[in-house]
Amino acid sequence: MASQAFSLTALPSAAPAQIATPSTDAPAKPKPCCVCKEEKAKRDDCMLFSKSDDPQKDCVSTIDQYRACMAGFGFKV
């Protein structure tokens, strides 16, 4: 068997497709729905299942934990 040499011809390269994205120096901020899920669930459970006449007063600590978590990601709640 004879070895056959072959050459690949270079095809003209096309410019890579550019995806339109906003150019910002800051990293992308996460969506509010995607952060602090555990704190949000605790807050919601406390508010929904509270036996108190004023669940907001009864759940102040869990609400504050959720607010602090959201503030850490740059959201005002």
Image (cartoon, grey):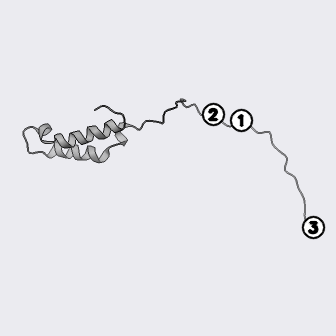
Q: Residue at x 8, y 45 (%)?
A: 51
In space, the residues marked 3 and 2 are separated at their CA atoms by 45 Å
The kind of residue tagged 1 is Ala
Query: Dot 3 corresponds to which residue?
Result: 2
Marks 1, 3: nearer the viewer: 1
Q: Quadrant of residue 70?
A: top left
| Local crowd size for mark 2, using a 10 Å CA cut-off: few (<14), some (14–19), many (≥20) | few
Which is more N-terminal, label 3 or label 1? 3
User: How far is disc 2 from disc 1 in space, using C-alphas?
Assistant: 9 Å
Residue 60's image quarter?
top left
How far apart marks 1 and 3 lie (CA) works out to 39 Å
Q: Quarter holding the C terminus?
A: top left
Task: Give the residue type that dot 2 points to.
Answer: Gln
Q: Position of residue 66 (x, y in %)?
A: 26, 41
The local secondary structure at tag 2 comes to loop
Residue placed furthest toward the left: 53
Contact between marks 2 and 1 (CB within 8 A): the answer is yes
Which residue, given by chain and number where applicable, does mark 2 sit on?
18
Nearer to us in this view, 23 or 20? 23
Question: Viewer-proximal residue, 30 or 64?
Answer: 64
- Residue drawn at the location 93% of the way across and 67% of the way down: 2
Q: Which residue is mark 1?
A: 15
User: x, y (%) of residue 11?
Assistant: 81, 42
N-term-proximal mark, 3 vs 2:
3
